[in-house]
Image (cartoon, rainbow, N blue to C red):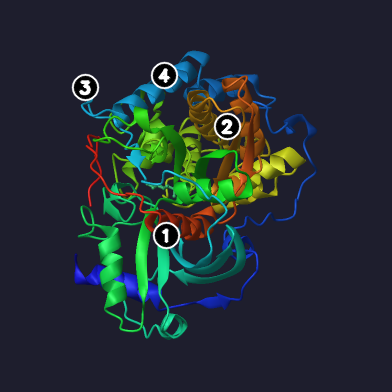
Amino acid sequence: MEDGNIKLFLSLLSRPQHYIRSNMTFSQSSSSSSSPSAPPSSSPPSSSSLYKATDLPHLTLTNTEKKQKIEALLSPLILTEAQQQQVREVFLEEMRLGLAENPERPSSLLMENTFIPQLLDGTECGEYLALDLGGTNFRVLYVVLKDGKFVEENVDYFEVPRELRLGPGEDLKGSSAGRNFKLGFTFSFPMTQKSLDVGILVSWTKSFNCSGVVGQDAVSMLNKAIHKRDNLNIDVNAILNDTTGTLVMGSYLDHRCALGIIMGTGSNGAYIEKVERIEKWLGKHPEKEMLVDIEWGAFGDNGVLDFIRTQWDNAVDEQSLLVHSYTFEKYYGGKYMGDLFREVLLTLAKEGCLGKGGVGKLATHGSITTTTVSTIEKESMEGEQATARKALEEAELEWEEEDLEVLKYVAGLVSYRGALLVSLLVGVLLQRMERPHCTVAIDGSLYRHHPRIRPLMEHLIAKFAPGHPFDLRQAHDGSGKGAALVAAIADRLHKNGATTTTTTTTTTTTTTKD
Ligand code: BGC
């Protein structure tokens, strides 16, 4: 491990930006920074463009020729029934290959064994810590559990620093003196787990790309950093993904939870699988079930989803930090949806279907954010259009009133496709798990702030998995609090003498670079 990375963890551990006392709602603080702010409407609602959350977006233009041209150009964003069916089949097949001991070809799905065979059983008691790294913030949590319930919660938020620096770490030093803490570490990147407390980074995703970490065990990196500090008596006893934390947090809220999803900057899912189906987990195991981290962000990295890939997906990928990787995540993830929207508008401007000539700033990567897309969607549902207007002005286009309808249509299409794709996967998982009822725990900024994702998913999942009752349940801060719960489960398993290490074979497509 590079020294710089020890410094990263140490500096993250030692630079609290603010400290929030116990028993408060974590989510208020974590969501406030990215909350979309809708400017007041500057024009009357256009009733013709009002649509329900679950409608397929439609374009309302008086110029029929232009309308038809736009619809034809953008038709690749609307998946046909046959394509939807193919996505389902390919997902199932990639899951099978990802779980196989000797797959015929590498799968794009990691299907990683989390080594968490059980959820909470209500006996968990004690103090636990959690670290959550993977989004825009880095967090440290302290919780006290009694009979499997939170009785005290504290959280520190940190911004991930640009420069690696060593800080004094006074807060944590002071609080840990003389006591030992078990710590759950949420590391929201693809990793190969050798045990509950060993996670080898497979590749970075989203906005992270620190050199020298791919192929390293994130737990030993963190342990080294911690143990360099005399007064820190902390053992990292579990490493997990944010989707795993979300699932466990979901099970805290509702014991029927068997699927955890993140739709935020990135996207992924974890579910409960039968151990007999995890063929690559060599040896005999007494466990019946196991949480599996799918890593569906990489779905299609081996080309199996090319049949739905559009020119705009290619453009987004080419401009991304980690090119030719995380295909599925780039179709709708919060880090990418704004750029996808912008790329589609750029094509329309070039084709003479948006503005009065020229492309303004539409060719500038990052100039339109996912928050803008969410807000345009919210306003479309309310008959407002202030944000669409603002986006056209900021793009420095010469535009006319009907262009607002075009923006709303494009925002609707990219959002609908994202919700549809995730719902297709969820439908497959519900059918596979065959539970009498499945609560799906879900979190992430895109899910929280986009007004149509939830209603659309409820509508589409019910269509794709008929006869499989489910609820979508928001698990606020599952990646943080879920990690503390996993530390408690790991502690219980350890005390009960359960084995948490073994060997798995891994054969997946990895096209990312460090
Ligand atoms: C990471 C996953 C994570 C997801 C959501 C993806 O980019 O690879 O591990 O679960 O983002 O944070």
Q: Judge by depth and name the residue closer to the eye, 97 or 227.
A: 227
Report the residue marked by disc 4: 89
> Which numbered disc, 1 or 2, marks the residue that appears first in the sequence?
2
Q: Position of residue 310 (x, y in %)?
A: 40, 28
Question: Callout 4 environment at 10 Å: few (<14), some (14 to 19), or many (20+)?
Answer: some
- For image coordinates 28% across by 39% down, the residue present is 324
Q: Position of residue 482 (x, y in %)?
A: 51, 55
Report the residue marked by disc 2: 416
Disc 4 under 8 Å from ligand 1? The reply is no
Instruction: Please tell me whether mark 3 sits on a helix, a strand or a loop.
Output: loop
Q: CA distance from mark 2 to mark 3?
A: 34 Å
Instruction: Please tell me whether mark 1 sits on a helix, a strand or a loop.
Output: helix
Tell me whether the residue at label 3 lies in contact with that at label 4, contact meaning CB atoms closer than 8 angstroms: no
For residue 18, which quarter of the picture? bottom right
Mark 4 or mark 2, whichever is nearer to me: 4
Question: Callout 2 environment at 10 Å: few (<14), some (14 to 19), or many (20+)?
Answer: many
Instruction: Please tell me whether mark 2 sits on a helix, a strand or a loop.
Output: helix
Mark 3 or mark 4, whichever is nearer to me: 3
Q: Residue type at mark 3?
A: Glu
Report the residue marked by disc 1: 491
> Which numbered disc, 2 or 3, marks the residue that appears first in the sequence?
3
Instruction: Please tell me whether mark 4 sits on a helix, a strand or a loop.
Output: helix
Tell me whether the residue at label 4 lies in contact with that at label 2, contact meaning CB atoms closer than 8 angstroms: no
Q: Residue type at mark 2?
A: Tyr
Q: CA distance from mark 3 to mark 4?
A: 17 Å
Q: Does residue 362 appear in this view?
A: no
Q: Position of residue 140 (x, y in %)?
A: 47, 69
Q: Residue type at mark 4?
A: Glu
